[in-house]
Image (tube, rainbow, N blue to C red):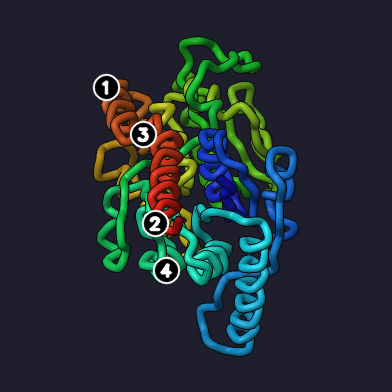
Amino acid sequence: MRLLIAASGTGGHLFPAIATATQLSNYEIEWLGVPDRLETQLVPQQYPLHTIGVQGFQERFGLGTLRTFTRLTGSILQVRRLLKQGNFQGVFSTGGYIAAPAILAARSLGLPVILHESNALPGKVTRLLSGWCDLVALGFDCSTQYLPKAKKTAIVGTPVRSGFLGETEPLPFSIPENAPLIVVVGGSQGAVAVNQLVRSSASAWFDTGAWVVHLTGTNDPHTDSLQHPQYLAMPFYDNMPALLKRANLAISRAGAGTLTELAVTRTPSILIPYPYAAEDHQTYNAKVFADAGAGLLLRQTDLTGEILKSKVSHLLKSPQQLQDMAIATANLAVLNSAEQLASAIAQVLNTEGKKNR
């Protein structure tokens, strides 16, 4: 069987799709993406990559919206032609704006579609087109309430990169074995506002013996403003599985991919949702963790360095609370998510394929 995977833009869309694709070894897979996005770096060495020009919809109707609709129509025709010429048997997407032309083109040809939604509040494309999909697989149980038109849903969690599920190499940092470690993660682009809050608070944490590994991203002009023997700052770090498994506490944004990684590594967290995320969806994600006792939800608009300093200091002095949070976090993990999702895809394709034969 030949399967087209439509996943584009950020690690939150790409990593779950790649993790799922590795479980579909019996399928001939090709990829649909957008030029100049992350998939152009990650995908071509594994799968043939096709790109189309498509973009998200504007909040207000205007000339930009008309251009977007025109481009969407052209993209649907492109994908339709690709599906026909490539003799694909179905489409799998992890959402985002690339999902729209992929879903609509597939349905126009009578091909089955499987869509995975990792966020607690499904994205606009998922909510709009869920009824066109044979299956909408979900990362969070609470998402079903937002998809009344979906034909069928399944809770499968969100797949993570394989490195999170196996043994990890030791960290190359000389952090004392018994020292508490705080890891600060701002997402793939970093988070300047969070970085500033952390730097203004960290001295109190150092006094307790804690170390801080701070992934600042590449957009922060003040990365050198804090110097301390117990503070390690870097734009990003590749071996996140080992880093999060070693961490006693993470301070993080609340993207679905990051939360999945925290759950798999059992890492307690203070979650500061990105306040400008589409429809404030990171707050919905963080609320799932907060309600489960897995993390503390702190809104950036209400947060000061003093509040963050106090919250972290309290947790560092409360090992039992951190342990309880770690257990609650682990309870949110779906360790075989990629296998579950791959199995669901295969079932849909096989079922629909028999109907069409």
Whether residue 348 is visible to the viewer of this picture, yes or no, is yes
Label 1 – label 4 distance at C-alpha: 45 Å
Label 3 – label 4 distance at C-alpha: 26 Å
Q: Residues within 10 Å of mark 4 (few under 14, many from 20)?
A: some
In the rendered image, residue 234, in percent from the top left (x then y), is placed at: 67, 34
The amino acid type of the residue labelled 1 equals Gln
The amino acid type of the residue labelled 3 equals Val
Instruction: Please say if the residues under marks 3 and 2 sit with CB atoms less than 8 Å apart.
Output: no
Mark 3 and mark 4 lie on one chain; the one further toward the N terminus is 4
Label 3 – label 2 distance at C-alpha: 32 Å
Residue 308 placement, left or right of 193 = left
Q: Is residue 193 above or below residue 270?
A: below
In the rendered image, residue 150, in percent from the top left (x then y), is placed at: 32, 63
Residue 182 placement, left or right of 141 = right
Q: Which residue is mark 4?
A: 129
Query: Which numbered circle lies on residue 355?
Result: 2
Image point (55%, 45%), residue name: 1
Comparing marks 3 and 4, which lies closer to the viewer? 4
Q: Which residue is mark 3?
A: 334
Comparing marks 3 and 1, which lies closer to the viewer? 3
Q: Which residue is mark 1?
A: 320
Mark 3 and mark 2 lie on one chain; the one further toward the N terminus is 3
Q: Is residue 314 above or below residue 342?
A: above
Callout 3: SS: loop
Q: Residues within 10 Å of mark 1 (few under 14, many from 20)?
A: few
Residue sticking out furthest to the front: 357
Residue 51 placement, left or right of 109 = right
Callout 4: SS: helix
Image point (33%, 33%), residue name: 329
Mark 2 and mark 1 lie on one chain; the one further toward the N terminus is 1
Quadrant holding the C terminus: bottom left
